[in-house]
Image (cartoon, rainbow, N blue to C red):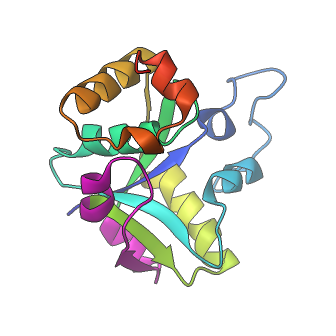
Amino acid sequence: MPWLLRQIIKGRWYGPPEGPGSYQWVPEGEVQADVLGDFRTEQGTLSVWEIDEGCNNLEAVITALSSSRSNLQNLDYVLVEQEIVAGLGIKIEGIPGDTPYEAANQAWHRDLRHLTATHVARLAFSCLRTGTSARVPRKHIARLLAEAVQAKKLELSLMHENLRREIGIP
């Protein structure tokens, strides 16, 4: 079964284990509310990316997401099984994405549609409890982008000039 990837800010999900900023106060079975910031919807729609069962397209999706940023930085994400999302009663539609990587936009971008606040809260909870999160370091992002540029996979005119400069493209 494929996965769905959502870009996140990992600091919202996992605070320090103790002291200021820790999430020890969150009751068992609950989700810290800041996590919902990573699930901002527009007209009841949330953008996600489908990752195949073997994660063979994961780096291409990471490249697509990174290519639409204004600068080179780490990329945090969470993967959740598509079956779990569908089981929440959430409609998943293949809608082209909006990044400089057109092939990825067409092949793997999905929208979660007709979302209610309950859907979003349940999705966040499912991602936290059953999902897998990871961080792709800035250095790895730079390599992925450089390879995609060399392979002519990215529409350079759609990339932010700061990002192009940081990876050595005029």
Seen in the picture, residue 7 relative to 149 is either above or below; the reply is below
Left or right: 162 as drawn, with respect to 143? right
Residue at point 24%, 55% (across, down): 103
Q: Is residue 133 visible?
A: no
- Asked where in the image residue 30 lies, by quadrant, the reply is bottom right
Image quadrant occupied by the N terminus: bottom left
Residue at point 69%, 76% (across, down): 117
Q: Nearer the viewer, residue 87 or 139?
A: 139
The range drawn in magenta is 82-107
Single out the residue that lies furthest toward the right: 20
Residue at point 33%, 58% (across, down): 105
Q: Position of residue 106 (x, y in %)?
A: 28, 64
Left or right: 139 as drawn, with respect to 29? left
Q: Is residue 46 visible?
A: yes
Residue at point 41%, 61% (across, down): 97
Q: Position of residue 88 (x, y in %)?
A: 47, 78
Q: Nearer the viewer, residue 98 or 8?
A: 98
Q: Is residue 93 magenta?
A: yes
Seen in the picture, residue 64 relative to 143 is either above or below; the reply is below
Q: Is residue 60 magenta?
A: no
Q: Position of residue 102 (x, y in %)?
A: 30, 54
Q: Position of residue 32 (x, y in %)?
A: 72, 49
Seen in the picture, residue 44 relative to 168 is either above or below; the reply is below
